[in-house]
Amino acid sequence: MPQPSANESSPPQGQAVHNLMTVKETAEYLRIPLPTVYYLVQRGQLPAIQIGGRWRVKKDMLDRDILRNQEEGQPTVLVVDDDTGLQGMFKLFLKKQGFSRIVVGTGKEAIAAMQKQKFELCFLDLQLPDTTGDEIYKVAKDIQPAMPIVIITGYPDSQMLDNILKLGPVTVLKKPLKVEALQQTMQMLGHKLNEKAKRA
């Protein structure tokens, strides 16, 4: 009895097959580090399924839910952090929650961005390659006094954080960051996350 050929036993090469991307393909497609994709998939932050023990990401849902064109009137968040893994997490998290976002890796870029447009919120890492986080905090408060700033740090006992706390109360997120911590922080600051999904 003839055995079925490879073509006969494999799924048809239709839209459903081409729609599924490997984790590596997803990392390249989104231009973020591979470990970040694994983390987001495992936390349910990306539209993925398991096939034969391997994750596959649904490209059409990714395009629709995360990479859709930014809508006019979206609140904009500034992220200042030179860690590429965290940059990728912020890009996906904020986009999925309906926020426009500007992600930069240096203090100079952050100041330039704040001078160009208004931000609803800023996430600021204390350890930057070109300056210190407390210096950027002071400049940010001069440029946009009403903008809430959330400090990101792996060193909560640092002198830089002490300098910032002397200027007033501030929200601090400790590294390594978790998606749940971001959600709680933004809810605490008054941003309604994913209201459309909750109403659906």
Image (spheres, helix red, strand yellow):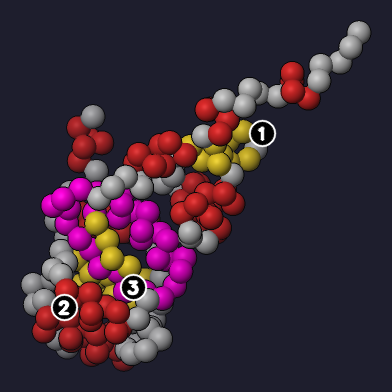
User: Considering only order in the chain, which callout, 1 or 2, is on the residue closer to the N terminus?
Assistant: 1
- Mark drawn on residue 115: 2
- Secondary structure of the residue carrying tag 3 is strand
Kind of residue indicated by mark 3: Val
Residue 78 position (above or below residue 14): below
Q: Name the residue under label 3.
A: 104
Residue closest to the eye, 57 or 134: 57
- Mark drawn on residue 60: none
Percent across and percent down for residue 76 are 20, 60
User: Which span is picked out in magenta?
Assistant: 71-99
Percent across and percent down for residue 169 are 15, 77
Task: Give yes or no for residue 12 being in the magenta stretch.
Answer: no
For the N terminus, the quadrant is: top right
Q: Report the Cα–Cα distance between label 3 and label 1.
A: 38 Å
- Secondary structure of the residue carrying tag 1 is loop
Mark 3–mark 2 contact, CB under 8 Å?
Answer: no
Quadrant hosting residue 22: top right
Visible residue check, residue 185: no
Kind of residue indicated by mark 2: Gln
